[in-house]
Each structure stands twice: as structure tokens, then as C-alpha cells.
Amino acid sequence: MIYILIIVLGIVLDRLSKLYAINNFIEKPINTPFINLTYLENRGAAFGILQDKRIFFLIITLAIVLYLIYYFYKSYKSNPVILNVSIAMIISGALGNFYDRFFNGFVVDFIEFSFFTFPVFNIADIFVTLGCGLMILYIVFIHEDK
């Protein structure tokens, strides 16, 4: 099933990229005019909010992922592809960062835009963001209340 592949692929890309960042960017960050590849231990959420609330993030992530899996299982056959892809991407990214928080106590971030101020992020964050963007497109332009 393509949706399970999206989840697994996202988790694998996230893990491999974070391992690469740990092994390469701690000592030797890469700075370019567009992207900086650096190493950051994020103990909070997006934009560094709620620092050191690990247990809260573990519980809330687990609750959201379990709900999304339940919803997906119950309705994936009747959902449009865009909604299923968005849910799979959100699950994948959430599990990628959950893994870090559970085993490390923090999330490894390493991608940073160098031409404007924006928080450092990772592949899991990209999956969550794109998944949420697709879900917003679905809700705004496709979904019809029945």
C-alpha cells in the first residue's frame, strides 16, 4: 500500500539524514548562500517554544498519531488520495521526531535557511508541514460537508 510506503520512507529518510547530521555537522557545519547544514538539539517544539517539555510532547504526539492511524484505518478507502497522503506524511514526520524525543530526549534539527531568519528544521518537520499543507488544501478546496 502506497500510504505505508510514504510513512516508512519518511521515517527512513529522517533517521538517515539525522544520523548524517550527527556524524558530520557537529564539527563541520556547511554554510552556503541559501542553506546552512548545522546541528541543533531542539528540546522544544516549533520555533523553540515549550522547551524541556519532553513528556508532554511524547504523550501528545502518541495521542495524535494513534488517532490519525485509527481515522486512517477506518476511512482510507473512502478518503480522497490527497487526504490519505497528507495523513501518511503527518504520521511519518510525527513518528520521526517522536523517535528522537523518546530515545535522545531532544529532536535533531540541521537544515537552516541562510538568507532569512527561520527556525532550524529536519526531514520529519518537512513531512509534517507538507502533510498539513495538503490537508489544508483538501479542507479548503475539495472537502464538501455532507
Image (cartoon, rainbow, N blue to C red):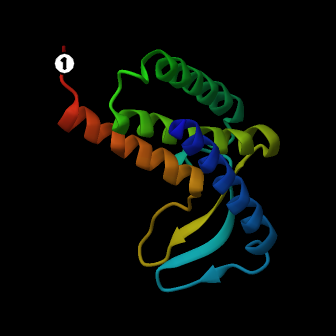
Q: Where does the image place residue 14, in percent across and percent down from the top left?
A: 65, 54
Q: Residue at x 69, y 78 (%)?
A: 29
- Residue 39 as seen in the image, left or right of residue 80: right
State the count of labels.
1
Tell me if residue 138 can be seen: yes
Residue that badge 1 annotates:
145
Q: Where does the image place residue 39, in percent across and percent down from the top left?
A: 69, 67
Q: Residue at x 58, y 37 (%)?
A: 4
- Residue 139 as seen in the image, left or right of residue 21: left
Q: Residue at x 18, y 24 (%)?
A: 144
Is 104 drawn above or below residue 120 in the view shown?
Answer: above
Q: Farthest residue toward the front? A: 1
Q: Identify the secondary structure beneath mark 1.
A: loop
Tell me if residue 47 can be seen: no
Label 1: few (<14), some (14–19) or many (≥20) C-alpha neighbours in 10 Å: few
Q: Specify the amino acid type for callout 1.
A: Asp
Q: Quadrant of the N terminus?
A: top right
Q: Quadrant of the C terminus?
A: top left
Q: Where does the image place residue 3, in percent across and percent down from the top left?
A: 52, 37
